Image: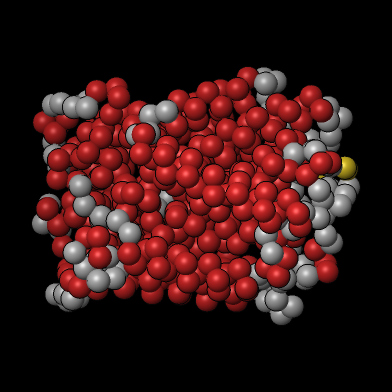
Amino acid sequence: MGIFRTKSINPGEYGTLRKCLNAFDVTFMGIGAIIGAGIFVLTGVVSATHAGPAVLLSYVVSGLACIFVALSYAELAASIGGCGSAYSYAYAGLGEVIAWAIGWDLLLEYGLGISTVAIGWSGYVQNALTAVGIHLPALFLKGPFEGGFVNLPAVLVIALITFLLCLGVRESARFNTAMVFVKLLAVALFIVVASFHVDTKNWAVFMPFGWTGIMHGAALVFFAYIGFDAVSTAAEETINPQRNLPIGIIVSLIACTIIYIVVSALLTLVVPYQTLNVASPVASVLLQLHHPVVAACISVGAIAGLTTVMLVLYYGFSRIFLAMARDGLLPQFFAKVHPRTQTPVSILLGSGLVFAFIAGMTPIGDLAELVNIGTLAAFSVVCGGVLVLRRTQPDLHRPFKLPFGSVIPVLGITFCAYLMFSLPLITWVRFIIWMAIGLLFYFNYGKKRSVIGSESGPVASKA
């Protein structure tokens, strides 16, 4: 079904993934990944330092960009399939070099995304424990760059997620669904309580940083929307992916965008935006409003919610890594799937050690900006892939096809490019360094061991 590269290794040689996810599962995967870091971590930081109350406009701008990109994802996910997400789409339409660059980019996006959310998760654990009178040693709550030794809660939660994903996708999906319900209840509780404390004076200066601040904020909160990309990595494990993946991608994005706008508006209406530059803004606001019990409940919901974000991002990372290993661009040792759990255990264990180290040692702000530029680059390529495949393979079976011809992919590319150029220069420098390292690795390793061969260009055939 869809496009498959004819020279790629047979996944069965290394073990196959389990096809067991339905439309409900993939939709909740999207919600599980999207609702989390944006509301529970980045909203306060972006409001206090970049956008002020106009952070809700930052979410509107990012949401519009994501709608265009999500529609492009939906078309390619239904047509191409596989577990490689934008990497596979780029391979089908743009060839191996571009595919490698996007795959390398996605590994950065997901890997640092997991570590970023783990740091936010740690902040909410600290707030929840403080609310009940438990104080952890400060030395084990921050990395060395912030005056501590290691962020131990962030390290431990990554270890927990690694173990859960190793058990199997069915078990992980059930856990995700349960935690999403807890997360949505927490968001609803915040909305109800905050509605009684609205003070319009907090919006007296709605755009303190101007339009530039809104756009920089949009580029940062874009991190909150990368969940629908993770949904597309579930194609190989989804029942009837041509139908269920577009549903999961589009429904989860629309629902979450509405929630983001409502919560960010309330957050800046109940307290001055300058007070929101903390790792756990929602719980902190409720403590300021003298609702310690509600703050504790919100913290529990946030902990559950951020756990699902890490779960889905980590899931997506492992599947993209698996797709690249199958193609020989990464060591094929990692293409092996455990025969009993049907999960890429070697990838999960190896990457878990790296993510835990990053989360334990690195400040959250530096990670978020680097993740976002990688996300925007990948999204631009996905939109470009739609345009290229429309020309090179016009007869390809497209169970879900974008309306309005090429307009939506072009708008997606335009929005993503604009947001990328709204990020600071240092973020671009870090991104370019990462991509240069990736290209060196490709030309010295991946190109020589590629199963398909870079000289074949865009190699694809209908299955």
The one of 71 and 431 positioned closer to us in this rendering: 431
**137 relative position to 382: left or right:** left
Q: Position of residue 148 (x, y in %)?
A: 21, 68
Q: Position of residue 142 (x, y in %)?
A: 25, 65
Q: Position of residue 447 (x, y in %)?
A: 73, 50
**19 relative position to 45: left or right:** right
Numbered circles on residues, count: 0
- Asked if residue 25 shows in the view, the reply is no
Q: Position of residue 380 (x, y in %)?
A: 57, 33
Q: What colour scheme governs how the chains and residues are painted in the rendered image of this protein?
A: secondary structure
- Asked if residue 124 shows in the view, the reply is yes
Say if 238 sits above or below 13 in the image. above
Residue drawn where x is 67% and y is 39% of the image: 98
Say if 337 sits above or below 315 in the image. below
Residue drawn where x is 42% and y is 28% of the image: 421
The one of 445 and 417 positioned closer to us in this rendering: 445
Residue drawn where x is 18% and y is 51% of the image: 285
Q: Residue furthest front?
A: 444
Residue drawn where x is 69% and y is 64% of the image: 331
The one of 23 and 377 positioned closer to us in this rendering: 377
**185 relative position to 249: left or right:** left
Residue 334 found in image quarter? bottom right
The one of 195 and 439 positioned closer to us in this rendering: 439
